[in-house]
Image: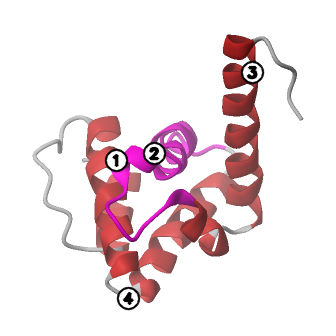
Amino acid sequence: MNALVDALDRACPGCSSDETELNYMWMGDFVRHVADAHVAGRHAEVQAAFDVIERVLADKLSPDRNLAVAGFLEDMQNGNLHKSGSRPADFVGYLGPLSRVSWDGLNGFWQMVEHSKTGRKPD
């Protein structure tokens, strides 16, 4: 596994995924695990995972920045990866300042994509 995957697994342990060789695939399983941890009330573990993401984003030279954003944050925004009792908006409070900028940027991007499909301009 890579450094980010290892750090996230330590922050919120217990993710059972067979995708240990494919970091982006593992991230989808990990996001499901974090959403389940949130629903179960294990908020310290969830916060620890988001703190790992924040540290990676703070390191401008980290090779894992794209995995943090396009893997973890984008997957966290995917409502299909959440079970009943969990939704993407539940995780905004865990975001640090840098991850919040990325989170908002992803939301803006997907809004533009959706509006380009419908022909309507963004609000």
**Real-space Cα separation, disc 3 to disc 4, in angstroms:** 36 Å
Tell me, for residue 115, which label it has, or none: 3
Residue ID for mark 1: 27
**Real-space Cα separation, disc 1 to disc 2, in angstroms:** 8 Å
Query: Which of 4 and 49 lies nearest the eye of the viewer?
Result: 49
Query: Which of 9 and 113 lies nearest the eye of the viewer?
Result: 113
The residue furthest left is: 18
Tell which circle, 1 or 4, labels the residue nearer the N-terminal end: 1
Mark 2 lies on a secondary structure that is helix
Tell which circle, 3 or 2, labels the residue nearer the N-terminal end: 2
Query: Which of 78 and 70 lies nearest the eye of the viewer?
Result: 78
Tell me, for residue 41, which label it has, or none: 4
Residue ID for mark 2: 75
Mark 3 lies on a secondary structure that is helix
Residue displayed at 73% across by 58% down: 100
Task: Assess whether mark 2 and mark 1 are in contact (beta carbons under 8 angstroms).
Answer: yes
Task: Assess whether mark 4 and mark 3 are in contact (beta carbons under 8 angstroms).
Answer: no
28 horizontally vs 49: left or right: left
Residue flagged by tag 2: what amino acid is it?
Asp
Residue displayed at 53% across by 68% down: 50
Residue flagged by tag 1: what amino acid is it?
Met
**Real-space Cα separation, disc 4 to disc 2, in angstroms:** 20 Å
104 horizontally vs 35: left or right: right
Considering only vertical position in the picture, is 53 above or below 105? below
* Residue 52 belongs to the span the image colors magenta: no
